[in-house]
Amino acid sequence: MPVSYDLDEIERGYVNLLSRYGATLALDPFRVQAEEAVRKARDLTGDLPVVVDASATIRPFCLAKLLYEAGFNLDTVYAQKCIPLDRPYMDWLLENAPDVRIVQPEHFRGAVHRGKDAPCLAVGFEGAYLSGASYVVNLMSDETLYGYHGVVKLMSMIAQALSAPADLKALLDDYGIVV
């Protein structure tokens, strides 16, 4: 079962896993908890632009679709490439979210900086650097974000990131980005 931010895909994964062992589990309470966490994070974020990048998650387009459908002001997805598992989500964004920019960060046009301390929330360090984000979700490679719990935890991380502007230089130095 891959990491996912698609609540239907998460449910299918749990059902598949449980069926292999002849087990059952009421998944509805966990899904409702994840949906509520997404709504709360969306309310906290308001109209603040959000960027997502592939340093935070191996499935940035899946995460971007969740955020977009939930009403977040999704601005940009930074991803050098798209893995096959994430391709349907990228295609969905291209078709249904034409206002969302998809940027290859290593492309010469990818390094267009929004400005120092731009008022936006970045999920991932690369997006934080490229956008000059003022709020940053400290996440790399989906660490511990699995299933419904992972969605809830990520939304909590978003709320935490919004509590105070980030020291972007310090975060990037800790992350190890060489500029």
Image: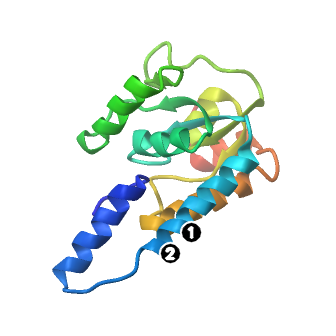
Picture coordinates of residue 60, whole percent (x, y): 44, 41
Residue tagged 1 = 33
| Nearer to the camera, 139 or 1 | 1
Quadrant including the C terminus? top right
| Residue 29 marker | 2
Is 151 drawn above or below residue 105 in the view shown? below
Q: Quadrant of residue 46?
A: top right
Q: Residue at x 61, y 62 (%)?
A: 36
| Residue 99 marker | none
In the image, taking residue 17 as reference, residue 45 lies left or right, namely right
Is 145 drawn above or below residue 52 in the view shown? below
Q: Mark 1: give few (<14), some (14-19) or many (20+) Cα within 10 Å.
A: some
| Nearer to the camera, 7 or 122 | 7
Badge 2 amino acid? Pro
Q: Provide the secondary structure element on which disc 2 rests.
A: helix
| Nearer to the camera, 36 or 57 | 36
Badge 1 amino acid? Gln
Quadrant including the N terminus? bottom left
Q: Quadrant of residue 157?
A: bottom right
Would you say the residues marked 1 and 2 are in contact, meaning their CB atoms lie under 8 Å apart? yes
Picture coordinates of residue 129, whole percent (x, y): 62, 33
Picture coordinates of residue 66, whole percent (x, y): 49, 46
Q: Residue at x 35, y 38 (%)?
A: 89
Q: Provide the secondary structure element on which disc 1 rests.
A: helix
Cα gap from disc 1 to disc 2, whole angstroms? 6 Å
Picture coordinates of residue 110, whole percent (x, y): 50, 19
In the image, taking residue 164 as reference, residue 94 lies left or right, namely left
Q: Residue at x 55, y 19 (%)?
A: 111
Q: Quadrant of residue 160?
A: bottom right
